[in-house]
Amino acid sequence: MEKKEQFEKLKKRIVETSLGISRLDKKTRFEFTQLADSEFCSDYGMTLKHLMDLHRQNSLLDLLSAKILELEDRVNEVEGKPKKVSIKTLGGKIIEKEEN
């Protein structure tokens, strides 16, 4: 009975820490494994954690940028300056123009 309990504990531990990824194109898989090999000694878990940290940082930067634009609009409104409108193109370029 003890071996069965040990097996179940080990199985539970593996399930809790395992992650399977499907529907991943070859290029993305290759780039991911190259990043893992070169930067994290082939440790896929740390590579994924690094990518998630970057995602969180980008999300935070987007939030901070939106707040800054909101504050700039409020300052311009108080000072009587025209409001700026920002448009982001598909290429990632940001175009700003004044609203009439």
Image: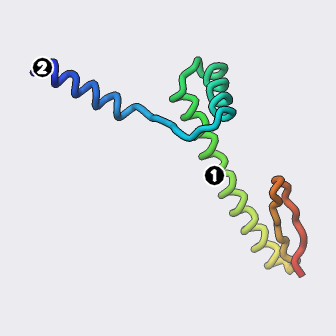
> Looking at the image, which is closer to me, 43 or 56?
43
Taking depth in this image into account, of 56 and 72 the one nearest to the observer is 56
Marker disc for residue 2: 2
Q: Position of 97 compared to 88: left or right? A: right
What's the residue type where badge 1 is placed?
Answer: Ser
Q: Residues within 10 Å of mark 2 (few under 14, many from 20)?
A: few
Q: Position of residue 39 (x, y in %)?
A: 65, 22
Q: What x and y, as percent, mark residue 97?
A: 90, 70
Residue 42 image offset from top left, x and y in percent? 57, 20
**Nearest the eye: 59 or 12:** 12
Which coloring applies here?
rainbow
Q: Residue at x 83, y 53 (%)?
A: 91
Q: Position of 3 compared to 100: left or right?
A: left
Q: Earlier in the sequence, mark 1 or mark 2?
A: 2
Q: Is residue 76 above or below residue 50?
A: below
Indicate whether 14 appears above or below 96.
Answer: above
As drawn, the label of residue 74 is none
Q: Residue at x 88, y 62 (%)?
A: 95
The residue carrying mark 1 is 59
Q: Quadrant of residue 27?
A: top right
The C terminus - image quarter: bottom right
Mark in the foreground, 1 or 2:
2
Picture quarter containing residue 48?
top right
- Does 65 appear above or below 25? below
